[in-house]
Image (cartoon, grey):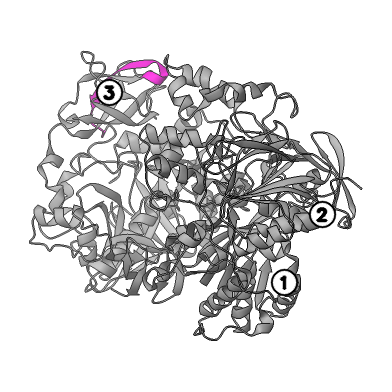
Amino acid sequence: MSPHRIAGRDQGAPIRFSFDGEAIEGRAGDTLASALMASGVRLMGRSFKLHRPRGVVTAGPEEPSALVTVVRPGRRDVNLPATMVELFDGLEAHSQNRWPRLDLDLMSVTGRLGSLFSAGFYYKTFMGPQGAWERLYEPLIRRAAGLGHASTEADPDSYEIVHAHCEVLVIGSGLAGLSAARAAGEAGRRVIVLEQDRAFGGGALVDGALESWRSSTLAALSAMPEVRMLYRTTAVGAYGHGVVAALERVADHLPEPEPFQPRQRLYVIRARRIVLATGAVERLVALANNDVPGVMLATAARAYVNRHGAAPGRSAVFFVNNDEAYAAVRDLKAAGIAIAAVVDPREPTPIAAEAEAAGLPVLFGHEVTAVRGRRSVAGVRVRKRGTMQERAIACDLLGLSGGYSPQTQLAAQAQLGTAWIEAIAGFAAIGPSPDAEAFSAMIPAGAAAGVFGRLEAARHGAAAGARAAGLASDPAQPPAEAREPAVPPRRDGPIMPLWEVRGRGKAFVDLQNDVTADDMRQAAREGYRHVEHAKRYTTHGMGTDQGRTGGLVGAAVLAAAQGREVSAVGLSKPRPFVTPVSFGALAGAETGAHFKPERRLPLHGWHEAHGAVFVRIGLWLRPLVYSGGDTSWGPVVAEARAVRSGVGITDVSSLGKIDVRGRDAAAFLDRIYANGFSSLSVGKARYGLMLREDGIVFDDGTTSRLAEDHFIVTTTTGKATEALEHMEFHAQCVWPELDVRLANIADHWAQFAIAGPRSRAVLSRIVAGLDLSNEGFPFMAAGEAIIAGVPGRIFRISFSGELAYEVAVPAGHAAFVWDAIMAAGEPDGIRPYGLDALNLMRIEKGHVAGSELNGQTTAADLGLGRMLKKKGDFIGRALAGRPALAAADRLQLVGLHPVNKARRLRNGAHLVSAGEPKRSQGYLTAACMTSEGPHDWIGLALLEGGHGRHGERMIATSPVHDEAIEVEIASPHRLDPENARVKA
Amino acid sequence: MLRITCPHCGPRDEIEFRYRGDASLSRPGPEDDAKAFQRYAYERENPAGMHLEWWLHVGGCRRALKLQRDTASHVIGGAGEP
């Protein structure tokens, strides 16, 4: 047996693992930290900035120092606290931030450079010349300072996000948590208990006197079908209204997940009430070289002895300022570890005096001033407080206890109050006040609420559980004795707040980020008075451990430097997550193709089979061009020419479609649109322009009147969701007196545009019940018809500028009708056209689209000012009339073409005048090759005062392409400005 | 994350709703001028405390509800139909 195992406590089955390539044997039930400790390994890592040797300090997730990388085939997990890594056969762990080896770290020279690396070192040192930061300093610093290096491979594991609901959520399973769960469970509530450890019990796991209570309580809970116990699960964020996120490490303790398992599972829990029973974490004391391997928190030393049978040392000195820590001293002594001294700055308390009487060498009124040793503790220097006379005591372990900080991070996130409790020298969760409870839904219990003592925490937890269950809690009637641990009441003497012992050497307040007490004083001197400012300047508390062990210590040093109380300085705000969460867990199953939903048109399969190149517009996949992959302009121009000379068909099913009905439907649309709709006759369609209340254009589309009280509104694809909400809001909230009903029919109807001079001929072959002649169904007519045997709707509207129809049929019939149109159009050479050709033709025609309806343009800017009603109210009426929105130098819609017609124009190029090449007067919103010339280009632009500048020559400049092209400004309506084609 | 009790659907997550602004405002009428509309469109009390607001249950019944919410504590006082 290893000499570092405690005799008689070496029971688990052997497990083989490796650390930095060395094969080591641990025992079942070990963590990596306990297994390394039991095999005599003390040096577990190098510190972040100074590369100082570091060992394990804690026995939990608050570990600041022993961070490792665990490597599995195809996987590499970094910055894991060795205290939380459960051993499995074949585990391969590596230390971090050392070069070339852990025991010979050449970068450790940084640690010898004295005070050079003090707070603000980077800011003050790595200045100028320009560009040097990115090119020189940052890469250098990143190599020298840092943590583990993440894998660059794709993550082979799966993750899942689970939604869970309960009436009472208990966070923590110590004395308070288990008591709360039992009380709520016995009341019949649905309970979820979260425990970050691999076993339930919290502090009871390291206290032999509580074992029988722990096992009987767990047995009682497991008999309650409505109580769900989750271990290896950390509550990582509290969001108010009973919502908590928790991370379950499902398979991190295994070589790899079982085939059916996710590696980790993120819970989103919605609870009616939450009992916060997160306990307290022991604090370090800032003193010289308090980071040497072998300096450990007293509770942690006790945990290694009692839970793992691992000996943290052979000869220990304890430096403690409270009575709780004496339990650790007693347990180490019982395990055969020599106690060289217990250094206690206080006067004797009853418990401390008893310890002395039992034979422990207690030095009352003394303090430890420094730790000796570099790679391992060799001893400590001790003096009587108030004197300068120091003496050395040899030891290989220093057990530190500066008191216990209630874990209030989740309480703060849920806006539960925290308050300074003098008796524990710390901030505890309080309340909640009845007001705040409605948001936080959280009841603190046990040590998290500042209630220390085993019996007291159990009772406090039971009361909190009863309250969370909605039972009237009666403090005069404590729960049945059988449910309480058989331990005496707490009789601890007072703690002596002790944050720092000044001496020679680095006294760390944040071991992970190498922040010393001197750094905190320097921050105070340089004016970083607020704890949040000091945190950011020094990086105090910014590591993966979030400053659990030294946060309050640093705040206390900062407070002392300012002559303030630490209770007034406070802790920095703890944001989610309270422990690191992998990106994989946050993403869950929503990776790759599942990252966003994909909306497919009803005819997606047809488009795919006919060589469509798809483009993603919002969530929609839409055919860009039918070219089998060729994305050059050739196929686009060919599609547009087919329409202009014959007939084409395109799928516009992604347009928003809203069915508007009711006695006041027309009056409602009159107010929604800037132009009027009550004047629209039944059987007609009209282009409509929606403004926002501030007078800016919101959306456009075509609206048709099918009956007096029945309209079909179409919106643009991009604004479909917003426009519907806009209309619903106004119908329900602004004009509830109007009789109008809205139905979103966007997905119910497929819609195709059939465009080109031959479109009427093609449609006439398959349309029944509607006279399609120019007289019978003129431009802007709308009506119902039977299309290839399918009842549908036809609108004579045109975006291309050609004679055109839009046909709408129920989505389930889309393929059938489309095929019928294609067959009917075959003699005319009908061909499908995509979004690029659609866009090309609208640019030629001068129609506006998304890039012109950009949330900055007014109707007047777009040349649509005359559409605004002169009479009657509508959204945007009043504010559209503001003088600044009518200013002559506003950006206004123009068309343009290059003087050398074949020069390629670029979307986004800026328009400048030759005399003023650096002042942008506008920019191109659209550019394309035309359907006319062989290789001619045209564009649309928004140009200062553009309406009055047709014929002017300007430069379209695109500095990123190193281009400057001479263009001529023109009307945006190049094609058929008289609108003869659409009316043909 | 807010949990909002929709009068039609019951308690639901905030993400099912779309915030539609201050519900204590009423839109000026056809006779009102730009000044009145400026107040309606731009000017807000922005209280640190109880605020009456519109929420549209777009991920549920698509009805609008009026919600009393404390902007400082996120305590929800009550929800009802317009």
Reading the image, the residue beneath label 3 is: A911
Circle number at residue A309: 2
Q: Position of residue A102 (x, y in %)?
A: 74, 29
A381 shown above or below A319: above
Reading the image, the residue beneath label 1 is: A214
* Element type at mark 2: loop
Q: CA distance from mark 2 to mark 3?
A: 77 Å
At label 3, which amino acid type do we have? Leu
Q: Which residues are magenta?
A: A959-973
A152 shown above or below A782: above
Inspect this view and state whether residue A713 appears. Answer: no
At label 2, which amino acid type do we have? Gly
Is A907 left, or right, of A504 in this rendering?
left
Is A204 left, or right, of A573 in this rendering?
right
* Element type at mark 3: strand
Is A754 left, or right, of A212 in this rendering?
left
Pointers 3 and 1 in contact (CB under 8 A)? no
Q: Position of residue A222 (x, y in %)?
A: 72, 76
